[in-house]
Image (spheres, rainbow, N blue to C red):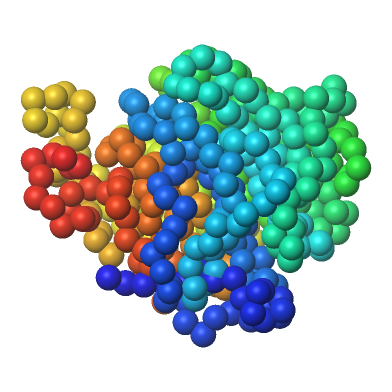
Amino acid sequence: MRFLALVLLAACSGGEGKAPKDLNEVDSEFNPGKRSEILALGDETFNTMVLFGGNNGPIVNQVPAGQFLEDTWVFEPGEGWTEVETTEHPSARGRYSFDLDPNTHTGLLFGGRFREGTSGPYTLRDDLWSFDYETRSWTVLDAGGDEDGPSGRYYPASGFDAETSSLYLWGGLTNTSAVTLTPGRDFWKWDGTAWSELDISGDVPSRRGFFGDLYDSQRKRIVIFGGQRGDFSSLAFQDTYALDVTTGEWTQLDDGTGPAPSTRMHAHMQYDAVGDRYLLFGGHTDIGDMNDLWVFDPNNPGWTLLYEADTFTGAGLGCAGSGREVPSDYVEMDLEAPERRHRGMYTLMWDSLWLFGGIHAECSDQLDDTWRFDLETLQWNELIEATSGEACARRGDACDCLCY
């Protein structure tokens, strides 16, 4: 097994911001357990990544049925995962936004959705919380419920501007129903004490949800890729847009007609400030999950494939007497890469991409593995093996179908 490390050195180095000597080692395979609908933030000053809650409910028709969590975990390169005991914390939820404030070394968590049980309407969150990396504690900044702030929503695009100490939110889904989607296009700013709604202009993207997003701190813009219009039937998008948070103006960066990631939802995205580039991993395409890695150059706009990983063979659905079951030859697998997935942890720190959990739609299960992608060697390193969610070939089993 290949090992890697995510370790919090703050406790032993006093927050000096030094990388562990070996990023490909962990002391323990202890981990948060399978889950999806999560985000995690890394702060190199404390060598810490923090993850909150998510959903570990059973997958029904490729959708988690809903068992929402309210636990807090840190991943420390060189050591591994640790659960953080907190006296106060956000309520159970998934599909929130999470952004790093590098000035105060805190993570700002907004919104998300929750449901008790496996049916009925969801409760949408509109509160704002702060996680302190030094004290490992949560503080509520805004309890929500104010008409002057953004309504409850899940999967908004977001970004934190360090120069003005402001959090920005755009769009997201505001439906409480699981079968009717309501994508928004409103734009909000949190200045540290209050919310204000801002105007947008320019080449505004069409209404959509389930897009991937990142914040480009150099150009002060939120960037989104793909998504879907919200009707459960149309193909996903594969275009790229940017919202200038200082002017509210939208610009289309790429229309998707040239080299680009395929149409998809739930793409994982990060801004690499050192390399000044956008990094996109996986997501859910119109024919299944992916595990490819793409790079976008904002100086010479365009996408380039960095790591291909699995490829679809063109085989149709149908296996073991079921027209919905996925056959074993559905994809040609790269066994050196992590399983295909969407809505897992995808974090950039120490010139590495760190991956945990998420949904593998074709196997109708969630993952609990931990990986590191070295941006210098362009190699994946598996730190903690999956115990759920992987296809048979990845776990070394012989099966009639892809996963069973």
> Depth check: 213 or 361 in front?
361
Vertical relation: 131 (above or below) 286: below
Q: Position of residue 388 (x, y in %)?
A: 30, 48
> Depth check: 213 or 302 in front?
213
Q: Is 135 positioned to the left or the right of 24 in the image?
A: right
Q: Is 268 positioned to the left or the right of 276 in the image?
A: left
Q: Position of residue 19 (x, y in %)?
A: 58, 79
Q: What residue sits 44% from the left and 21% below the top? A: 118
Quick check: can you spot residue 205?
no
Q: What residue sits 71% from the left and 76% below the top? A: 15
Vertical relation: 36 (above or below) 279: above
For residue 351, which quarter of the picture? bottom right
Q: Is 61 positioned to the left or the right of 293 in the image?
A: left
Q: Residue furthest right?
A: 193
Q: Position of residue 376 (x, y in %)?
A: 47, 76
Vertical relation: 266 (above or below) 130: above
Q: Position of residue 206 (x, y in %)?
A: 61, 27
Quarter in which the C terminus is drawn: top left
Quarter in which the N terminus is drawn: bottom left
Q: Is 66 positioned to the left or the right of 41 in the image?
A: left
Q: How many marks?
A: 0
Q: Residue furthest bottom?
A: 21
Quick check: can you spot residue 316?
yes
Q: What residue sits 59% from the left and 18% below the top? A: 176
> Depth check: 116 or 42 in front?
116
For residue 174, which quarter of the picture? top right
Q: What residue sits 55% from the left and 57% below the top? A: 83
